[in-house]
Image (cartoon, rainbow, N blue to C red):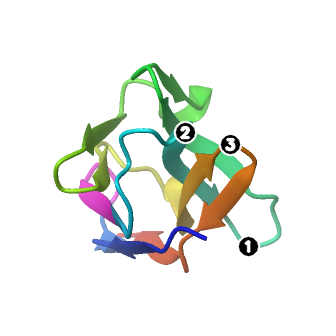
Amino acid sequence: QVQLVESGGGLAQPGGSLRLSCLASENILFFNAMGWYRQAPGKEREMVALINLSGLIDYADSVWGRFTISRDVDKKRVDLQMNDLKPEDAAVYYCHARVLSRLSWGQGILVSVSS
């Protein structure tokens, strides 16, 4: 299992910004995919943003144009810049990595959006 450690969550006002970071315990260069999921109370976990081995990026429709995922291979890190936050973005955010069939998850980090 790859160890994934998230940081950067917290409270933001609607329209505000937060940046999440995920630090991996291994070289991420050859990860098949790495990115972020989220789970709000009473809802299923959903994909937010993923970047694959080739650098292709996929975003959930609900965050398109507001969130940006980036990868720093040298630092073994993936970040999620979240702008124009909305109350519906509030959730526990999980870092995720896939190496072939091996799936890894971070412990989760809380993002709250409230005025």
Q: Which residue is mark 3?
A: 100
Which residue corresponds to the image point at 70% horizontal and 55% vertical from the top-left? 102
* Residue named by callout 2: 33
Which residue is at a point 54% across and 39% down the rendered structure image? Answer: 33
Numbered disc in front, either 3 or 1: 3
The amino acid at mark 2 is Ala
Q: Position of residue 51 (x, y in %)?
A: 46, 33
SS for dot 2? strand
The CA distance from mark 3 to mark 1 is 30 Å
Q: Is residue 103 left or right of residue 8?
A: right
Q: Quadrant of residue 73?
A: top left
Q: Position of residue 23 (x, y in %)?
A: 32, 66
User: Residue 41's mark?
Assistant: 1
Q: Residues within 10 Å of mark 1 (few under 14, many from 20)?
A: few
Residue 14's place in the image compared with 62, above or below, is below
Q: Which quarter of the rendering shows the C terminus? A: bottom left
Closer to the N terminus: mark 3 or mark 1?
A: 1
